[in-house]
Image (cartoon, coloured by chain):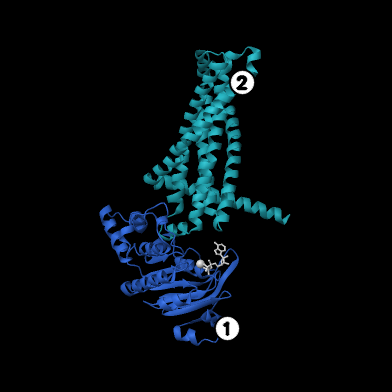
Amino acid sequence: MKLFLEKMADIVETVGDFALMVFKGFRYMLTHFRTGDTLIQMDRIGVGSIPIVFLASIFAGLDMALQFEVVMAPYGARALLGKVVTTSIIRDMGPVLASLVMLARVTAGISSELGMMNATQQIDALRVMGVDPLDRLVAPRIFAGIVMMPILSISGDFLALLAGMGISTAIGHVPAPLFWSGVRDALTAQNLTNAFLKPVFFGFILTSIGCFYGIRSSGGAYGVGRSVTKAVVAAAIWILVANFLLSKLLINIWGLS
Amino acid sequence: MIQFESVSLGYGDKVVVSDINIAVPEGKTMVILGDSGSGKSTLLKGVLGILHPMSGRITVDGDSVGDLDEKDILLYRQRIGMVFQEGALFDSLTVGENVGFWLWEHTDWPDDRIEERVRTLLRFVKLEDVIDKRPEALSGGMKRRVAIARAMAPQDPKVMLYDEPTTGLDPFTSRSICDLIRQVQAEFRVMSLVVTHDLHDAFRVGDLFSFIHDSKVILTGDRKTIEESKDPFIRTFLST
Ligand SMILES: Nc1ncnc2c1ncn2[C@@H]1O[C@H](COP(=O)(O)OP(=O)(O)OP(=O)(O)O)[C@@H](O)[C@H]1O
Ligand SMILES: [Mg+2]
C-alpha cells in the first residue's frame, strides 16, 4: 500500500513537472521567440524526416488500397475504394503512421541529445550562463514539432493517396477518375480537421516528451539510454491514446458523417 | 571573499557535505582536495547557486548566494566564471560561438565587437587559431582552455571556479593548464576555487588547501600546514 502511494505520488510529481515544462516552454515561445534556433530545429525535425515519412506513407497507401480492394471487390463496391482509402488514411493511418516513424528520429534523437548535454554538464553550463534550457533547448524543439508534423503528415497523406490510386488502377481495375472522385468525396470538413489537428498534437507529444526525459536524465551513458527508452515508449503510447481521444472528440463534434 | 558558514549541501534528503566552514580571501586560490564522490563538485554547485544549502550560508563578497532571487542570481553569476569538469563546451557550437555565447545572449553588442572580444580571450588562452573548429575536434587540454576563455567572457570575473581542470590530462598539459590558472589569477586578481584530486597540481596552483573526507572538511591551511599534518588520511594522500 505504501509502495502504491509512493508510486502515485511519483506519477503526480512527474505530470506536474511535465506540465510546468510545457507551460514555461510555451511562455518562452510567446515572450522570447528564438528564430535562429527554431529554424535549425524545423530543419532537423521536419526536412530531415521527409524521406522516412514519405516512404512509409507510400507503402501504407499501396497496402491499404490492396487490402480494402480484397474486402470490397466481392460486394461490387470497387467504386467506393477511393473514398474508403482516403478516409482511413487522412483520419487515422496517415497521422499515426507518420508520427510513429518519427519516434526514432525525433523523440529518441531529442532525448539522447539533451540527455548527453545533461551528462556532460552542458545544461548546467547554460544555467550558469544565465540561459534557461527551457528557453534555448525546449521551446524551439516543441515549436518545430508542432509546425512541421502537420506539413509532413499531410504531404505524406497525399503521397499515400497517389500510391493507392496507382495500385488500384494497375491491378484493381478501378479507373483513376473513379478512384479520384472517391477521394474528393472523402475530403469532408471532419476528415480534413482530423488530418490537420492530429499531427499538431502528435508533433507536440513527440518533441515535448523527448525534451522532458532528456533534460531529466541522470547518470551518464546508462542514464541516457534509459531516458531514451522511456521517452520513446511514453511518446508511442501517448500518440495512440491521443489519436483515440481526438477521433472521439471530432466524432462527437461532427457526428458520424 | 568567498565564505562557507556551517554549510551542508546535498540532493533530496541525502546529505553530501555537512558543516563546512572555509573562506577564500580576496585574490587567493583555494584548492579543494578529496576522493572521488566526496562532494567537491557539490561545493561548487553551492557557490554557483545551482544547489541551495540545506543549512548554513555561502556568501560571496557579502551576498548570500542562497537568498538571491532569480534576477539577482543572474547578475551574481556574471561575476563568476565556471570551468566545468571536462569543459562542458556546447558541442553544437563552434569554439568561437562557445566563447562568445554569453555575449550573444546577454548583450546587444554588434557582431564585430563580440568577435573581437572572443579573439582576445582565445589569444589569452593561446588558441586563437581554433576559433572556427567544433569542440569535438579539440584535445582534452584545448577544451579546458576554451572553457576557461568562455568562463571569462562576461566581463573580467571576480571569482573563478574550476572543477578538476587537469583530470585526464597528461602531466605536461596539466602543467600548462595550472600555469594558465595562475596567470588568470595574477592578471585579473580573482579569487579561485579549484577542485582536484591531484596533489601536484594542487600545490602548483593553490595558496590554501582544504581536504574533504567523510563529508567534512578535515583540514584547511597553507602548504606547510598540510605537509606537517599528522592526520592519517592526509598522510596517505600526501604519500601517493
Ligand atoms: N544530481 C545528483 N543527484 C543525486 N546525487 C548526486 C547528484 N550529483 C552528485 N550526487 C552524489 O553526491 C556525491 C558527491 O558528488 P560530487 O559530484 O560532488 O563528488 P566529487 O567529489 O565531485 O567527485 P568526482 O571527483 O568524481 O567528480 C556523490 O555520492 C554523488 O553520487
Ligand atoms: Mg566532481
Identify the residue shown where x is 54% and y is 16%: A170
Residue A198 visible (yes or no): yes
User: Marks 2 and 1, how far apart in space?
Assistant: 81 Å
Q: Is mark 1 within 8 Å of ligand 1?
A: no
Identify the residue shown where x is 45% and y is 50%: A137
Q: Which residue is mark 1?
A: B232
In the rendered view, does A102 fall on the left or right side of B137? right
B169 and B104: which is toward the camera: B169
In the rendered view, does A18 fall on the left or right side of B121? right
Identify the residue shown where x is 38% and y is 54%: B134
In the rendered view, does A33 fall on the left or right side of A52? left
Which residue reaches farthest right? A1
- Counting from the top left corner in percent of width and height, residue A194 is at 53, 29
- Counting from the top left corner in percent of width and height, residue B200 is at 45, 77
**CA neighbours of label 1 inside 10 A, class few (<14), some (14 to 19), many (20+):** few
Q: Which residue is mark 2?
A: A68
Chain of the residue where label 1 is placed in the rendered structure: B
- Counting from the top left corner in percent of width and height, residue A130 is at 41, 58
Under mark 1, the amino acid is Pro
Residue B62 visible (yes or no): no
Under mark 2, the amino acid is Phe
Visual hue assigned to chain B: blue
Visual hue assigned to chain A: cyan
